[in-house]
Image (cartoon, rainbow, N blue to C red):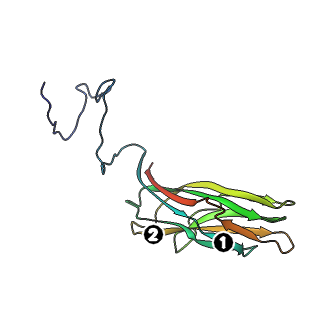
Amino acid sequence: MADGILKVGQIQTSSGSGTITIGQSGETISIPSGTSFSGFNSIVGIKSNSSDSAYSSVTVNATVTLTDFNVTYTPQSTSNKLGFIVNIPYYYAGSATGVTGILINDGASDITNYFYYEYDSSNNRENSIQGSYWGVTPASTNSTTYTVKARTYRASGSNSINIGSSSSLTSFVTVIEYRE
C-alpha cells in the first residue's frame, strides 16, 4: 500500500464495539502541536513562571501577597479545570514562626483554600514551600495573573520570616489546564 493521507470524519469498528488500533508495535504515532483531544482526561495547557525574588521580614500574623510569585495564563475554556504547583525552595523562619498557609489569588479573589502548612515552635529553620492545588474552575477565558499569597504566623517575640531565593535557588509557580 502506498503512503498517503486518510481523510475521514469518524473511525468506528464495523461491529460498533471493540478496539480500534492505530499503528503497530515499534511505530511512533505523531500528534502535531496545537492538536487537542476530547472525550477523556487531557492536559490542554501549561504555563510556568520562575522568580529569583526574595521577601525579607514579611509581615507576620497576616496573609501577605507575594507579587513576584505569579503566573499569567489564558484559560481555553471555563469548562476545564486548573491546577497550580508552587515551589519556593527557601524560606527562613525564626523560632515560633512559620508559613501556615499558601493560596492562589486571581487578582479579584482568593480562588483556592490554603494548601500548605509549616510551623516550628522551637527552632530557627530553613524550609521549602512545595504544594499543589487542583480542581479550580477558571472564572473566564481572559488572560489572568494568578499570584501566591502566604499566611504567616508568629507566636511571640520579634522573629521575622524571609521568603524567596537563597543562593541560586529559583522559585516557580505553574498552572496546568486540564479536562476532566
Identified at 30% across, 42% down, the residue is 31
Q: Quadrant of the N terminus?
A: top left
Can you see residue 89? yes
**Would residue 118 appear left or right of 41 to someone viewing this image?**
right
Quadrant of res 2: top left
Label 2 crowding class (10 Å Cα cut-off): few <14, some 14-19, many 20+?
Answer: some
Q: Reply above or below: 92 against 20.
A: below
Q: Which residue is mark 1?
A: 55
**Would residue 74 appear left or right of 168 to someone viewing this image?**
left
Amino acid at dot 1: Tyr
**Would residue 144 appear left or right of 101 to someone viewing this image?**
left
Q: Which residue is mark 2?
A: 144
Identified at 42% across, 67% down, the residue is 140
Amino acid at dot 2: Thr
**Would residue 1 appear left or right of 120 to someone viewing this image?**
left
Farthest residue in the left direction? 2
Q: CA distance from mark 2 to mark 1?
A: 23 Å
Can you see residue 117? no
- Residue 127's spot in the image, x, y percent? 72, 57
- Residue 3's spot in the image, x, y percent? 14, 31
Mark 2 or 1, nearer chain start: 1
Foreground label between 2 and 1? 1
Identified at 25% across, 28% down, the residue is 13
Quadrant of res 172: bottom right
Farthest residue in the front direction? 167
Label 1 crowding class (10 Å Cα cut-off): few <14, some 14-19, many 20+?
Answer: some
- Residue 87's spot in the image, x, y percent? 60, 57
Count of marks placed on residues: 2
- What label sits on residue 45 in the rendered view? none
Q: Reply above or below: 101 against 25.
A: below
